[in-house]
Amino acid sequence: MFVGTWNVSGRATHDALNLRDWLCTTTTTPADIYVLGFQEIVALNAGNILVNKEKKPDSTRSWLSLIHNALNEEASNSSKGGSLYQLAGSK
């Protein structure tokens, strides 16, 4: 199991950001389960704080996509294809 936390201070994702080293997906035995905590994933302003809780802000969706891609890059490059990791929950 890999457990990690990161305060992103409301910064957006960008193409040069590589999470694979932090998530240790480049090792020969990556974790079976990843538990990740991100703080301040959206800018701390009234619009983001009071937004409808059912709708995820674009920045949240961007981070979730970046994490999914980093965890599943090896699987998608293999001959089997598909995803090894699936999101179990996000709050």
Image (cartoon, rainbow, N blue to C red):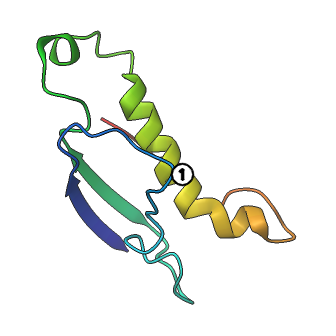
Name the quadrant containing residue 6: bottom left
Tell me where residue 39 sits by quadrant.
top left
> Which quadrant is home to the C terminus?
top left
Left or right: where does residue 47 sit relative to residue 17? left
Foreground pick, 90 / 73: 73
**Nearest the eye: 89 or 55:** 55
Q: Residue at x 43, y 75 (%)?
A: 21
Residue extending farthest to the right is: 79
Residue 34 in the image: state x and y as whole percent. 40, 64
Residue at image point 44% right, 46% down: 14
Q: Is residue 54 above or below residue 82?
A: above
Question: Does 24 appear above or below 88?
Answer: below
User: Residue visible at 74% across and 61% down?
Assistant: 76
In this picture, residue 58 sits left or right of residue 79? left
Element marked by disc 1: helix
Coordinates of residue 36 in the picture (x, y in percent): 31, 57
Q: Quadrant of the N terminus?
A: bottom left
Q: Amino acid at mark 1?
A: His
Q: Nearer the viewer, residue 18 or 16?
A: 16
Residue 53 as seen in the image, left or right of residue 17: left
In the rendered image, which residue does mark 1 sit on?
A: 68
Residue 57: image quadrant is: top left
Instruction: Find residue 63 and report its horizontal and vertical position in percent.
Output: 41, 42
Number of other residues with Cα within 10 Å of mark 1, as a class: few under 14, some 14 to 19, many 20 or more: some
Q: Is residue 35 above or below residue 2?
A: above
The number of discs equals: 1
The residue positioned 53% from the left and 87% from the top of the image is: 29
Using the image, determine if residue 58 lies above or below residue 54. below
Q: Which residue is outermost to the bottom?
A: 28
- Report x, y in % for residue 75: 71, 66
